[in-house]
């Protein structure tokens, strides 16, 4: 079972970024997927979840209305579209399912 995030980078406040997570080694279409993040000096926090069908989606209040989670079961990927980014969104972003985590991708929002 493996998850690999990509798409992180350095952006200015108000800009957008899309993260992607590629899955392998398990029946991706059967499992819900999550995005989490960990900012420097803080605990890891949950950001968004999507169920196996893509119909049930939940967001943390801090990103609701700005972030969009989606999945492509045939491609075995889950994405996180992040708009109107703020400096407080700076963190390492991780995708996760069950007890499996990716290595993370760094997102830095700074002017």
Image: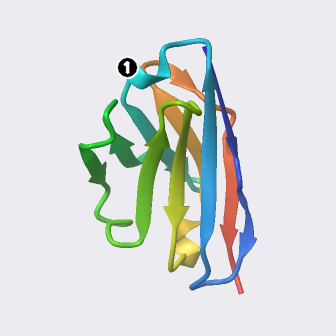
Residue 23 visible in the shown view: yes
Q: Nearer the viewer, residue 30 or 106?
A: 30
Q: Is residue 75 above or below residue 2?
A: below
- Say which quadrant the N terminus sits in: top right
Q: Secondary structure at mark 1?
A: helix
Q: Nearer the viewer, residue 39 or 67?
A: 67
Tell me the quarter of the picture where residue 53 sits. top left
Which residue corresponds to the image point at 57% horizontal and 56% vertical from the top-left?
39
Q: Is residue 82 above or below residue 84?
A: above
- Say which quadrant the C terminus sits in: bottom right
10 Å crowding of disc 1: few (<14), some (14-19), many (20+): few
| Residue 44 located left or right of residue 110 | left
Q: Residue 63: x percent and y percent?
A: 38, 66
Residue 40 visible in the shown view: no
The number of numbered badges drawn on the structure is 1
Q: Residue 76: x percent and y percent?
A: 56, 30
The residue that mark 1 highlights is: 30
Tell me the quarter of the picture where residue 104 sits. top right
Q: Nearer the viewer, residue 6 or 73?
A: 73
Residue farthest to the front? 74
Which residue corresponds to the image point at 53% horizontal and 30% vertical from the top-left?
74
Which residue corresponds to the image point at 62% horizontal and 47% vertical from the top-left?
20
Which residue corresponds to the image point at 59% horizontal and 49% vertical from the top-left?
93
Q: Is residue 92 above or below residue 28?
A: below
Q: Residue 71: x percent and y percent?
A: 46, 42
């Amino acid at each position: 079972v493996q998850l690999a995030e990509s798409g992180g980078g350095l952006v200015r406040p108000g800009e957008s970024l899309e993260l992607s997570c590629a899955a392998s080694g398990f029946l991706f279409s059967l499992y819900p997927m999550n995005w989490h993040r960990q900012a420097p000096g803080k605990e890891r926090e949950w950001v968004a979840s999507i169920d196996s069908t893509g119909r049930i989606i939940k967001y943390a209040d801090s990103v609701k209305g700005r972030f969009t989670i989606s999945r492509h079961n045939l491609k075995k990927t889950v994405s996180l579209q992040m708009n109107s980014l703020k400096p407080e969104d700076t963190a390492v972003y991780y995708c996760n399912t069950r007890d499996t985590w990716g290595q993370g991708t760094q997102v830095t929002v700074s002017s």
